[in-house]
Image (cartoon, rainbow, N blue to C red):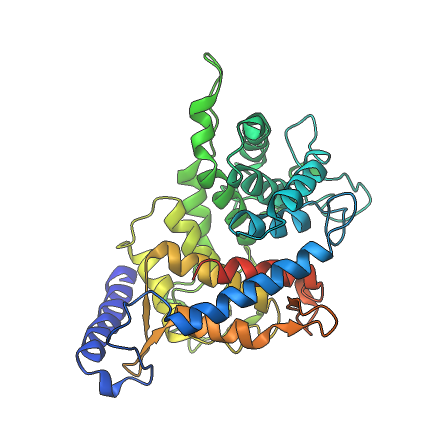
Amino acid sequence: MMKKIACGVFVGLFVMAARAQAEPARSTTVISAHQPVGKLDISLQNEVDAAIDRGLDWLAAHQKKDGSWSNGTFPALTALPLQAFVRSEHPRRRQVMDEAVRYILGCARENGGIYRELPDRKGGGLSNYNTAICMTALHALQRPALVPVVQRARKFITGAQHLGGDVYRGGFGYDRDTNRAYTDLLNTYYAVVAMRETQDVEDLRARGEKKVDINWAETVKFIERMQNKPEEGKDDAGGFFYKPGQSKAGTVTNKAGVVVFRSYGSITYAGLLAMVYADVSRDDVRVRSAFDWTARHWSLDENPGMGAQGLYFFYNVLAKSLDTYGQDLVPRPDETLVDWRADLARKLVQLQKIDPKTGSGYWVNKNGRFWESDPVLTTAYALLALERL
């Protein structure tokens, strides 16, 4: 029943999309006949490039002497800006990256994890979160000397997968050493990205050394458990929530009187990308229904279901997800098509704040939930999104 309903909705959207492409006058999104779909026009690309340059200038000026950014307790907050520089052509690129790498390597532990121990903090040092983001950034540098570090980090992440006999099975949490069953879709997303994007280092292991990997089949099962089904109600069907028994967007009671964990934007894009990275077919009903939810709830003015909370992570994961999924236009229920790259580019250029003294630029969220009052974090999110366009 789920497959029949979700496929029908998805196919219907694409029929509308095709009709809208054939009748451009009915679309509220104007796309130049001379501009290839999926590519920004020259003027907008120039604006994006300038915004990226300003953002990188701002980050370079705010890097600390030890190579870190922001709160040095969490090396992921250094790894995210590092990723932005990896994808750039900034004039100080090499110096900035070298200093950041030295700091991150200083956080590498004998067990393969890349984090700082915080025994008195709930979730400890967020070992899985920090390791996944750091290993992804280090691997992106494509430096042979870093391969052993990434290989050890892969072993750490693999050992962090929860494989107990409960609803958390197959997922990942913040810290594998808390001795409690706790996994969520956000940490699972980061683990999946890290393991997929670094998988080629397994071919570089020494002869006789065992290759490591996560249990992808169980990972997919966990991700699926976080996806709302058609019986949960039209508004939430296909979207994702945070973890078993909790949605950061709260709950709602559907028409059948059942309490539903609400779907929301950022975690739905994370779930969509995690499934694609886990080699679930783009034609699979779970993937299609996830994309269908994003199309029905399209907005760049908010993180759908969450308002301003987590807005810049939302922009970041939206760009990475749709780019990886291979979707250039988002079909809306009113039969219009959204050129998401152009719309996101304009939104982020508009939101950038300019330092009047230096002319550099940054982004920050007035809503501080999920650490987004930290301009280093939000600037890194914004830059990584713009670099995907």
Q: Quadrant of residue 362?
A: bottom right
Give the image location of residue 368, x and y in percent. Answer: 70, 68
Query: Which residue is nearer to you in this view: 170 or 78?
Result: 78
Residue occupying the point 65% across, 73% down: 353
Which residue appears farthest toward the right when viewing the image? 120
Q: Quadrant of residue 150?
A: top right
Count of numbered circles in the view: 0
Query: Would residue 258 be seen by someone viewing this image from the given angle?
Result: no
Q: Is residue 1 above or below residue 68?
A: below
Query: Which residue is nearer to you in this view: 295 or 345?
Result: 345
Which residue appears farthest toward the top when viewing the image? 208
Query: Which residue is nearer to you in this view: 17 or 6?
Result: 17
Residue occupying the point 36% across, 64% down: 291
User: Which quarter of the rendered picture does the N terminus lie within?
Assistant: bottom left
Horizontal side of residue 64 vs 3, given as left or right = right
User: Which quarter of the rendered picture does the C terminus lie within?
Assistant: bottom left
Q: Is residue 127 above or below residue 55?
A: above
Give the image location of residue 120, x and y in percent. Answer: 82, 44
Residue occupying the point 44% across, 50% down: 274
Which residue appears farthest toward the bottom when viewing the image? 25
Query: Would residue 203 be seen by someone viewing this image from the given angle?
Result: yes
Give the image location of residue 347, x and y in percent. Answer: 51, 75
Horizontal side of residue 250 vs 344, given as left or right = right
Horizontal side of residue 370 vs 323, given as left or right = right
Give the image location of residue 258, x and y in percent. Answer: 47, 71
Horizontal side of residue 114 vs 386, given as left or right = right
